């Protein structure tokens, strides 16, 4: 018997099941084996010996049922905790998405405000540049007019002074003729009744009379070289002023045209993309 017990070896499945068995199960089995070993000893009285567990099979069944119940409860608790953790994670992700969306919206709004402020500053700069250019042009025109009308007082040369004085004396009669011509134009213009300006024929009459008066005044006037240069300079200033005004008017009309057409075409594209056919 000793040889048989010494040569006996447990299978791999036994070790696996034994190690996987709950601790109370293993403790009960070990106690049962201990009782059997004690009973086999010669000094143990057989008649009075009592096993620690009266019915080992029934006791093991009870232990397995208790273990399974505990496992079921533990699994339920673990599942509940996992579900709560999942809900918590979902809520956390939703909150993070809301925060990110709010931050993105705020960033876009700040970018839009910054862009609007930049455009406003650029528009103000352009407006200031335009006003400065207009003021500079007006200042140049005034200085040119004053330079053409007023003699150069810094030149003290006697010969130039005498020449200017003689030119003024010789052309006094021409100046008087200019005054008479201007008076004639004013009289013709004031002679037209205000009510007659309401139609094209009255306006044509004013233009014809004014043109006739100007033609007669120019025909009869004999201007000196100085006066001719002055008139030519004023004519050049009028041409420059009208050219600038026409260019400014052209740019404004082009800007207005681009804005109107862009809005109109954008609305058409939007209607077409939404499936709305243009109305006849």
Image (cartoon, grey):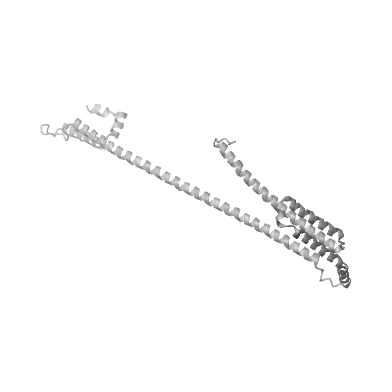
Q: Quadrant of the C terminus?
A: top right
| Residue 258 position in % (x across, y down) | 65, 46
Which residue is nearer to you in this view: 267 or 74?
267
| Side of 107 where 221 appears, left or right | right
Which residue is nearer to you in this view: 218 or 66?
218
Residue plotted at (79% across, 53% down): 208
Vertical side of 87 occupied by 107: above or below: below
| Residue 60 position in % (x across, y down) | 21, 32
| Residue 276 position in % (x across, y down) | 55, 36
Which residue is nearer to you in this view: 184 or 259?
184
**Rendered image quadrant of residue 171:** bottom right
| Side of 141 where 3 appears, left or right | left
Residue plotted at (44% across, 46% down): 98
Q: Quadrant of the N terminus?
A: top left
Residue plotted at (24% across, 28% down): 5
| Residue 17 position in % (x across, y down) | 29, 31
């Amino acid at each position: 018997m000793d040889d048989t017990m010494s040569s006996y070896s447990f299978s791999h499945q036994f070790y696996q099941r034994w190690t996987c068995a709950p601790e109370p199960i293993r403790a009960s089995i070990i106690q049962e084996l201990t009782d059997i070993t004690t009973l086999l000893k010669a000094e143990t009285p057989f008649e009075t010996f009592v096993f620690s567990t009266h019915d080992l099979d029934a006791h093991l069944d009870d232990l397995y049922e208790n273990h399974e119940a505990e496992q079921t409860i533990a699994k339920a608790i673990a599942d509940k905790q996992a579900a709560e953790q999942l809900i918590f994670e979902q809520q956390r992700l939703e909150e993070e998405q809301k925060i990110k969306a709010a931050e993105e919206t705020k960033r876009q709004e700040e970018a839009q405000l910054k862009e609007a402020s930049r455009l406003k500053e650029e528009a103000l700069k352009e407006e200031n540049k335009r006003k400065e250019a207009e003021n500079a042009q007006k200042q140049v025109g005034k200085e040119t007019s004053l330079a053409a009308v007023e003699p150069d007082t810094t030149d003290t040369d006697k010969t130039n002074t005498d020449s200017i004085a003689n030119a003024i004396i010789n052309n006094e009669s021409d100046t008087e003729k200019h005054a008479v011509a201007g008076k004639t134009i004013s009289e013709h213009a004031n002679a037209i009744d205000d009510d007659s300006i309401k139609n094209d024929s009255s306006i044509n009459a004013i233009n014809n009379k004014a043109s006739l008066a100007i033609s007669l005044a120019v025909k009869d006037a004999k201007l000196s070289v100085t006066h001719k240069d002055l008139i030519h300079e004023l004519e050049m200033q009028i041409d420059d002023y009208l050219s600038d005004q026409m260019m400014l008017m052209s740019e404004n009309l082009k800007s207005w045209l681009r804005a109107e057409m862009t809005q109109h075409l954008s609305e058409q594209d939007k209607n077409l993309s939404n499936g709305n056919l243009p109305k006849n």
